[in-house]
Amino acid sequence: MKMKHFFTVLGGMGTLATESYVRLLDQRTPTHADQDYYDYIVVNHATVPDRTSWILDHRKEDPRPALLEDIRQQSLLKPDFFVLICNTAHYFYDELQAATSIPILNMIEETVKEIKHVTPQAKRVGLLATPGTIQSGLYDGYLTKAGYEIVKPTPELLAATESLIYDDIKQAGHSDGAKYHRLVQAMIEEQGADVVILGCTELSYAEEMDPETEFPVVDSQSTIIDRTIELAKRQKLGQD
């Protein structure tokens, strides 16, 4: 029996974050039997060049050819939709979407929409993310359009965030819970944010590993997991 309805996860950026996505996706899926889980394909393309490196310096290796090839290959299988598990890769969202007629869930857009559900009265929204996401202003237009004031990390907080993402999670393969919690606390207490967006899936991984923060956060990966389930459920119910 072939899969009538399925989606494709474009991951590997990085692998631990992709594993976190899949783990939480399956945990949140209501199931009573194997057949209750959703059909999906995970492309763990770990060798996609670093997105931040190219955004900050176009002399570095360009990640777009690898991402576009993944889109083209997977489009031949005709998934119902794509999920792109990397905030920074959404820098190329319009170009990737233009390469296929199959919809790609927009993690940035959905995360900003989620703010009103987490902290309805929020006015100042903090952002923790990679230097590529921060400096490119990837979230800025969405937040401004939604009426929020953007609170970006200081150079010191950005450096600490980069260290957690790259040194601890991507390179060492584990999270530093104390470092993660200090970052969120600083954005709320020192920078005056009402809520903090976790705008990198490695930060989402940190939140899963050490979910003790007492401060309000909008987790981009958690948000896109919920949207994945909502869309996959509708597709599954519409099976022939």
Image (tube, grey):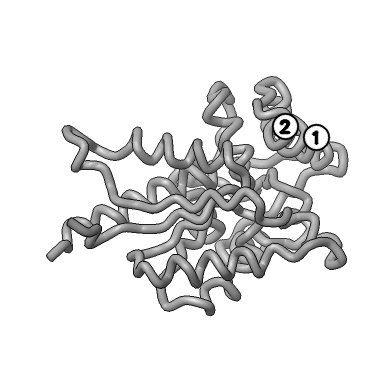
Q: Residue at x 61, y 54 (%)?
A: 87
Q: Which residue in the rendered view is the most extreme toward the front? A: 1
Q: Which residue in the rendered view is the most extreme toward the left? A: 240
**Pointers 2 and 1 in contact (CB under 8 A)?**
yes
Residue 235 seen in the current view: no
Q: Please state, as top left, top right, bottom left or bottom right, where the N terminus lies in the image.
A: bottom left
Q: Residues within 10 Å of mark 2 (few under 14, many from 20)?
A: some
Q: Residue at x 58, y 70 (%)?
A: 68
**Three-letter code, disc 2:** Leu
Residue 81 position, x and y percent, is 38, 64
Q: Is mark 2 on a helix, strand or loop?
A: helix
Left or right: 101 in relation to 165: left
Residue 160, which numbered label? 1
Left or right: 136 in relation to 143: right
Residue 183, which numbered label? 2
Of the numbered discs 2 and 1, the one sitting upstream in the chain is 1
Residue 182 position, x and y percent, is 72, 26
Q: How crowded is mark 1: few (under 14 residues within 10 Å), some or many (20 or more)?
A: some
Q: Residue at x 51, y 56 (%)?
A: 10
